Amino acid sequence: MATDKKNAILREGFLVKRGHVVHNWKARWFVLMPDKLLYYKYEGGKRDSCQRGKILLKDCVLTCPFLEYENRPLVFKLQTAHKVDHYLEACSREERDAWAADVTAAVDKLRTADGGKTTNQQEPDKSQLHNIDLSKVLDSMYDVHSGIKMSNHVEQGSTYSNCFSGSAVVDWLVFMQLVLTRVEAVTLASALLEEGFLRTVGMRSVEALRTAGLSEQFMDDSTALYSFSDSLKKRGSVKAETSLSAVELSGAVVKRGYLLKQGHRRKNWKVRLFVLRSEPAFLHYYDPTKDDLSPVGGFSLRGCLVSSLNDNGVPSGESPSQKLLHF
């Protein structure tokens, strides 16, 4: 019975892992077990039977979010008892936080079994937020080297430059250890917004500020956009530009995740990050091994036919233009 519990699968799915020797990023299939994290390689649309590696969870330290990779905001770091760092990237903020919570729970359970304290037993300093100097927080956020990264974002067909999302602000505040939890980060960000240090950009954050209560002014959301106040525009001004190429990326994100996609010419299978959008309905895919933030492909869902695959991997009535995805 104890052996069955030890071999129980707590969570599994694709994550993108940075290599130890060559620091490139590769998609791997991860399996979380009570005392270790295993990872496998996918080839030909199938998972290798032999594991590529394992991470022992006993006395591991997890850092989430981990924001030292500018173009990879969904990374979390796992440091083993022997001070070996593993960098793993999820497909979305929700997936990243879910993986981090499950790994933390497994580490805590191992620590409790050894008579130690869990990470959840740390008592937060309730007076911490009351003693924070908002001007110093703003200076840190605005720092060109270690501050929050500004980039272009698309909302409803308009591209806004030199801004950042609400979830990026929350991630940064937690990563810089200015707060302990995401809830505290939202409270601190709301104070910055109320004092005029930050301002809303785009319809979603503007509407949230107009309709929400005092404690919910700031949104921990990847689609709510913000920027620095107009008096701090030396790092660049926010501009809204509408372009035809941006329209297809302007729809609301319905779902995002890793899928195996078959190539058109070579017919090989590769892991891609897929993002499903509505109004307009598009499905875009990205190469998770690259730092490029632009999609490598995509198509409109208008008039699309979705077929289920047979056991031999060929859908009935397959047409030459059909896209093959492995769920």
Image (tube, rainbow, N blue to C red):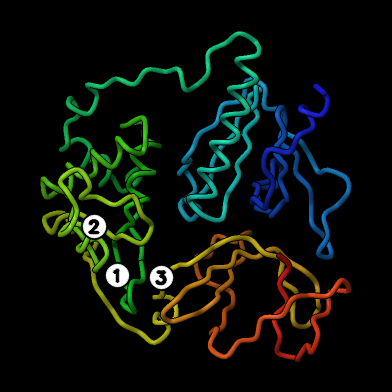
**Depth check: 171 or 123 in front?**
123
Q: Which callout, 2 or 3, points at the residue further toward the start of the chain? A: 2
Across and down, in percent, residue 266 comes to 81, 78
Residue at figure coordinates x 17%, y 58% from the top left: 211
Q: Pick the quarter of the image with the N terminus.
A: top right
- Residue pushed farthest front? 1
Pointer 1 with pointer 2, Cβ within 8 A: yes
Residue at figure coordinates x 64%, y 50% from the top left: 15
Comparing marks 2 and 3, which lies closer to the viewer?
3
Q: Is residue 213 positioned above or below 237 on the image?
A: above
Spatial CA distance of label 2 from label 3 is: 20 Å
Three-letter code for the amino acid on which mark 3 is drawn: Ala
Q: Which callout, 3 or 1, points at the residue further toward the start of the chain? A: 1
Q: Residues within 10 Å of mark 2 (few under 14, many from 20)?
A: many
Spatial CA distance of label 3 from label 1 is: 16 Å
Residue carrying label 2: 227
Q: Which mark is residue 252?
A: 3
- SS assignment at label 3: strand
Left or right for 120, reference 299: left
Three-letter code for the amino acid on which mark 2 is drawn: Ser
Residue at figure coordinates x 81%, y 77% from the top left: 267
